[in-house]
Each structure stands twice: as structure tokens, then as C-alpha cells.
Amino acid sequence: MVFSDHPDGLLIDVRVQPKSSKTAIVGIHGEALKIKLNAPPVEGKANKALIQLVAKLLKCPKSNVEIVSGQASRNKRLLIHIDNNGDIESRKKSLKKILLDQI
């Protein structure tokens, strides 16, 4: 399951491929969103690139994107923090659509 609900927002399972020729969402890998990253997996560079990419695509601050598990792994779980202002369910739905439209 790529997406799942969380009390603070939306959880996203991702599979990253560091040291790629490009940085982009490229598809689904098993039950995770596959993301290629140009950054190498050293000194947290790939994690920073992942957070920057997701924040840019979702048009939210980088502080709203948190790696909650898998910091040193290719398989990661991201938490996208969503403010309690407005309709949270419609915001989650639009975030999912934005990410899936990148494939």
C-alpha cells in the first residue's frame, strides 16, 4: 500500500534509487512509490534530495516532509504533515493525485 492515513497527515511508502541520472518519480515498485535520485547515498544527501523533491512537488515546506523510517535504507516511509485547517481528506486525496500524476 503506497499511501496510508496517519493522525498528522499522510504516510507514503517509497523505494529510492540513489545515484541515478535524474531525480524523478518513475513508477510503483511493489507497494511503494519508486523515486530516482541524482544524489548519492552518503552523508544524508539522498534523504535531503528526497525531501526536497517531495516538498517541491506537493508545494509545501520541506519541514512538512519527514522520513519516519528507513533513513539508511532504500525503502523509506515519509510522513507528509497536513495542517488541521480545512478538509484534511480532500487534501490527502489531492496529494496522492499530485504524486501519482508524476508517473
Image (spheres, rainbow, N blue to C red):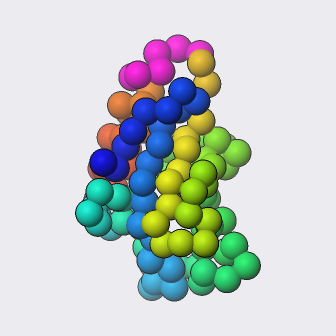
Relative to 29, say whether 31 is above or below. above
Q: Is residue 97 within the magenta segment?
A: no
Q: Residue at x 43, y 33 (%)?
A: 5
Quarter of the figure with residue 35: bottom left
68, 35: nearer the viewer: 68
Q: Position of residue 39 (x, y in %)?
A: 59, 79
Numbered disc total: 0
Does residue 102 appear in this view? Answer: yes
Q: In this rendering, would 9 be left or right of 35?
A: right
- Residue extending farthest to the right is 43
Q: Which residue is at a point 41% across and 22% down the rendered structure image? A: 89
Q: Judge left or right: residue 53 versus residue 17.
A: right
Q: What x and y, as percent, mark residue 32?
A: 34, 58
* Residue placed furthest toward the top: 86
The structure residue drawn at horizontal position 67% and vertical position 83%, both measured from the top left corner, is 42
The correct choice, above or below, for 47 with respect to 81 in the image is below
Residue 89 counted in the magenta span: yes
Q: Closest to the observer: 7 or 56? A: 7
Please state the horizontal and vertical placement of residue 82, each as a whole percent of the image.
57, 30
Q: Residue at x 36, y 59 (%)?
A: 33
Q: Is residue 82 visible?
A: no
Instruction: Specify the quadrant that holds the C terminus.
Output: bottom left
Q: Which residues are magenta?
A: 85-90
- Residue 26 x/y as whole percent: 32, 67
Q: Nearer the viewer, residue 6 or 22?
A: 6
